[in-house]
Image (cartoon, rainbow, N blue to C red):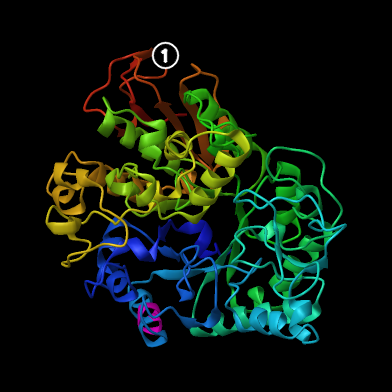
């Protein structure tokens, strides 16, 4: 049986704004990505996922699309994108695009027509609803805080829905024409040679009812719009009528998904894989994510192991453009290199398709805004304003809380290529978001390439090992009982059995299986028989 590339390769996520700026305007671009394709090839990457590069007013950094058939001029042209596909193909690297179809920009021609002409067919492309007794149509909340309803200008008591910002009106999937529009978008890019799509908030596209949601602090109304029965039907249709014709694939961003629902997505061939987010709350309060809680390794290990055992295939990650840097969340300042390497062993040994986020391979850390005025993330700004109003806290207090938890700017600072001006992101005088100053301390690609003990060299070694290991790529997963701070598990495929042991703490931990026998990967230079050093990780071949 032929193995599809998404099950055989590692995916590298590029946040185009921050990857590489080729024309020194402060913004990353497509030609910058092209220039670093050889680097990605040398790293061992086989697929690239691009965060949105479509035409957009950039209110939510591209997740508000104004025209699906145009490339945002700040990133380049459609010819540049075609060239990226061509150059990547020459290196046997496939391209995955971000598909944002729960909503459009409020500047999309469909929505502008829907607003200007209530009798237009485009009014039914979105979700418009009359208010009730002078109030919004229901009590649903935006994911970015506050109500998800915005008053329509110059119309009495009429509102439109936006599960995210008011600049991102939700599409109406009860309308057949909307589904056909999405199919046309998919066809357009698949014909160009795009390999697949990462589907943004894809389990929220269908709203079964507009009834009031039951009371909860966060996500009110989700019982009527998350993973609804018709959502499954629509995804199955997109797969059967479009995706499968091209041998492409879909990976879904699926908020609040359960293993039971996740298995439906997979069993029915609606999605080829999806992301779970349960482990991402291991250091946050799930009911109120702006409240930080102390990180404990067991709170990361437990949900990851649960999902490894519960579904046959996953999109596996530790960080992305919406979350803090993993070494800053789960690692250690004192054992910075050791913890970054341990996390790489953990990530790259799990079952599923591995996703590495740009800069993760060099141990990039959180970029923390120094003031409210530094913030770029629209979600953080909206949440701060809502929390100030509801919790009666000062802006500085809420800003500090946001900066330690959900601030999405953390992982969006420019890629650190070398130790020259702006970390080699460009040769200009400005960057769209400030560069993390620790690029001067050796956290950059060039310096790490020159250091044989660097995080980057270890990632290259670990990626190469996974790419050549059938046990890691295709093997079954079985947890092994161990210390609460240790991730210990077996990956087995045919005659190959690997034991992975990862200490995710700053303590020495005894383990009888830590022996100097059949060691294939070791983050340390030696083995202390029966004991793991802080953040030591090993892979052994066993009978």
- Secondary structure at numbered mark 1: loop
Q: Residues within 10 Å of mark 1 (few under 14, many from 20)?
A: few
Left or right: 536 as drawn, with respect to 296: left
Q: Is residue 302 magenta?
A: no
- The image quarter containing residue 32 is bottom left
Residue at image x 71%, y 42%? Answer: 259
The answer to whether any part of residue 520 appears in the image is: no
Residue at image x 65%, y 49%? Answer: 146
Q: Which residue is mark 1?
A: 512
Residue 212 rendering spot, x and y as whole percentages: 84, 49
- The image quarter containing residue 78 is bottom left
177, above or below 219, in the image: below
Left or right: 528 as drawn, with respect to 53: left
Residue at image x 32%, y 21%? Answer: 534
Residue 59 rendering spot, x and y as whole percentages: 49, 65
89, above or below 27, in the image: below
The answer to whether any part of residue 521 appears in the image is: yes
Residue at image x 73%, y 76%? Answer: 154
110, above or below 327, in the image: below
Left or right: 208 as drawn, with respect to 426: right
Q: Which residues are magenta?
A: 81-85
In depth, the one of 220 and 192 nearer the eye is: 220
Main secondary structure type of the part rendered in magenta: helix
In depth, the one of 145 and 66 nearer the eye is: 145
């Amino acid at each position: 049986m032929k193995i599809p590339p998404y099950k055989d390769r590692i995916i590298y996520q590029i946040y185009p704004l921050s990857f590489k700026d080729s024309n020194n305007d402060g913004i990353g671009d497509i030609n910058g990505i092209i220039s670093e394709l050889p680097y990605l090839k040398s790293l061992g990457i086989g697929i690239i996922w691009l965060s949105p590069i479509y035409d957009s007013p950039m209110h939510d950094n591209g997740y508000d699309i104004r025209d699906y058939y145009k490339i945002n001029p700040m990133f380049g042209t459609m010819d540049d994108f075609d060239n990226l596909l061509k150059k990547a193909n020459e290196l046997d690297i496939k391209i995955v695009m971000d598909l944002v179809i729960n909503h459009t920009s409020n500047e999309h021609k469909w929505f502008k027509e829907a607003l200007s002409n209530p009798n237009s067919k485009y009014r039914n492309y979105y979700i418009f609803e009359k208010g009730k007794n002078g109030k919004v149509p229901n009590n649903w909340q935006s994911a970015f805080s506050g109500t998800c309803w915005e008053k329509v200008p110059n119309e009495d008591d009429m509102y439109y829905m936006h599960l995210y910002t008011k600049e991102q009106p939700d599409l109406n999937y009860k309308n057949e024409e909307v589904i056909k529009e999405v199919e046309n978008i998919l066809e357009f890019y698949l014909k160009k040679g795009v390999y697949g799509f990462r589907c943004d908030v894809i389990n929220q596209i269908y709203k079964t009812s507009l009834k009031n949601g039951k009371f909860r602090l966060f996500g009110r109304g989700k019982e009527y719009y998350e993973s609804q029965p018709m959502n499954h039907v629509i995804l199955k249709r997109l797969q059967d009528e479009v995706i499968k014709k091209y041998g492409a694939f879909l990976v879904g961003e699926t908020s609040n998904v359960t293993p039971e629902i996740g298995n439906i997505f997979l069993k029915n061939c609606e999605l080829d894989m999806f992301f779970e987010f349960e482990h991402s709350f291991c250091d946050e309060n799930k009911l109120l994510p702006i409240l930080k809680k102390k990180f404990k390794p067991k709170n990361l290990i437990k949900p990851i192991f649960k999902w490894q055992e519960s579904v046959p295939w996953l999109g596996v990650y530790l960080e992305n453009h919406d979350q803090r840097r993993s070494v800053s969340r789960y690692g250690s300042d004192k054992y910075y290199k050791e913890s970054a390497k341990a996390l790489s062993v953990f990530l790259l040994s799990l079952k599923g398709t591995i996703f590495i986020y740009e800069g993760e391979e060099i141990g990039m850390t959180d970029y923390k805004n120094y003031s409210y005025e530094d913030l770029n993330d629209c979600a953080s700004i909206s949440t701060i304003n809502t929390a100030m109003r509801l919790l009666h806290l000062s802006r500085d207090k809420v800003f500090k809380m946001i900066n330690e938890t959900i601030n999405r700017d953390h992982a969006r600072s420019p890629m650190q290529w070398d130790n020259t001006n702006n970390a080699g992101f460009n040769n200009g005088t400005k960057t769209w978001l400030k560069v993390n100053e620790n690029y001067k301390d050796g956290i950059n690609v060039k310096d790490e390439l020159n250091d044989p003990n660097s995080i980057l060299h270890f990632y290259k070694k670990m990626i190469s090992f996974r790419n050549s290991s059938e046990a890691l790529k295709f093997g079954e997963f079985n947890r092994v009982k161990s210390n609460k701070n240790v991730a210990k598990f077996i990956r087995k495929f045919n005659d190959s059995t690997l034991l992975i042991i990862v200490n995710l703490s700053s303590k020495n931990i005894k383990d009888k299986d830590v022996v100097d026998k059949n060691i294939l990967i070791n983050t340390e230079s030696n083995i202390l028989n029966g004991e793991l050093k802080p953040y030591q990780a090993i892979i052994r071949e066993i009978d």
